[in-house]
Image (spheres, helix red, strand yellow):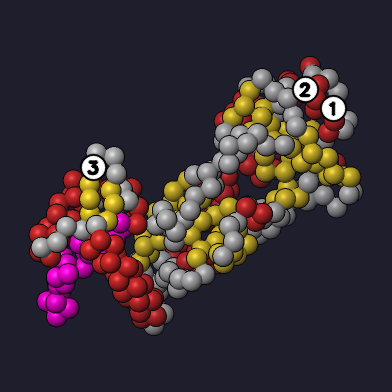
Amino acid sequence: MPVLPTAKLSRSDLADLNSFLVVEGHRSFTKAAIELGVTTSALSHSIRNLEARLGVRLLNRTNRTVSPTAAGSTLAKRLAVGFQEIGGALAEVDQHRDRPSGRLRINVLSDGAKLLFTKSLPAFLDAYPDVSVEIAIDDRMVDILAAGFDAGVRYGETIPEDFIAVPISDHIRWVAAASPRYINRAPRLETPDDLLNHKCIQIRTGQGVIYRWDFDKIGDRRVIDVPGQLCVNETEFGIQMALADRGITYCPEERIRAHLDAGRLQVVLPDWSPLGAPYYLYYPGRRQMPPGLRELIDVLRADSSTWSTRGRPA
């Protein structure tokens, strides 16, 4: 198979080879274009130019699928090793800089984005102006390696195996809450089982299942499959519906801190509010940590310590 001579590799050659590797990994021009931050037509043009220079077809394309040819598959395997070595070498060089530089792509739960990143990210960007950050907010469980992310943020018990996971918050207090208007006109609540007689705003998780609400009181743990006329798949909409007197929602206490302080929402069954797993940032263990990721972890951990322990029951 023809190969571009190493001595004659230009910046354009390296960019096109990297583009090819990303397309081959995603098996999609659209997904690869999103990761690379270019248009699909520009990416397709780059691959065609690369194939023309090599004189070999690298990808089979149809209206629905993209797959490597035999030559493309061989080239992709070699490039993956080579670019990993290049990335590692650049990361080692970056350690000698006063400040990290590069690009970070992070996949984050919507609650984690709201609680952690909206507060911490501006300070991080100011402190490290040579690091660019892309945040993808997604409650689904994403294969961050296949999707081209450097790291992800999820609750501790949901982290996939074979990743390095670092806690970036304390344990999270989960609460059930409703508007005063709903509470005043609804049946009395004394134990979690009483929720079976209430309008609860159900939650469909990123894994596609209806979440069962957890409660704990001095070791007495209850898991309730709550009833409800309404089901949502994000915390924010559930909060808005609770504010509209549509029932009881369930979420991290800090997500509704402002509403609690203002009296717009009230915690029900406060003695039963459990402490759940912290947020974790996780990244592939077999890759060198990208420049800037360690600094981002430090900023997130420092900021989250100011809120995560508030309201913790004795």
Three-letter amino acid code at the position of disc 3: Thr
Q: Residue at x 29, y 69 (%)?
A: 79
Image height check: is 27 above or below 124?
above
What numbered label is drawn on residue 198? 2
Image height check: is 113 above or below 251?
below
**On the rendered image, what quadrant is the N terminus found in?**
bottom left
Q: Residue at x 20, y 62 (%)?
A: 16
Q: Is residue 3 magenta?
A: yes
Three-letter amino acid code at the position of disc 2: His
Does the CB distance between marks 1 and 2 fall below 8 Å? yes
Label 3 environment density (alpha carbons within 10 Å; few <14, some 14–19, many ≥20) = few
Q: Quadrant of residue 258?
A: top right
C-alpha gap between disc 1 and disc 2: 7 Å
What percent of the width, then of the height, locates residue 180? 74, 25
Q: Is residue 95 magenta?
A: no
Label 2 environment density (alpha carbons within 10 Å; few <14, some 14–19, many ≥20) = some
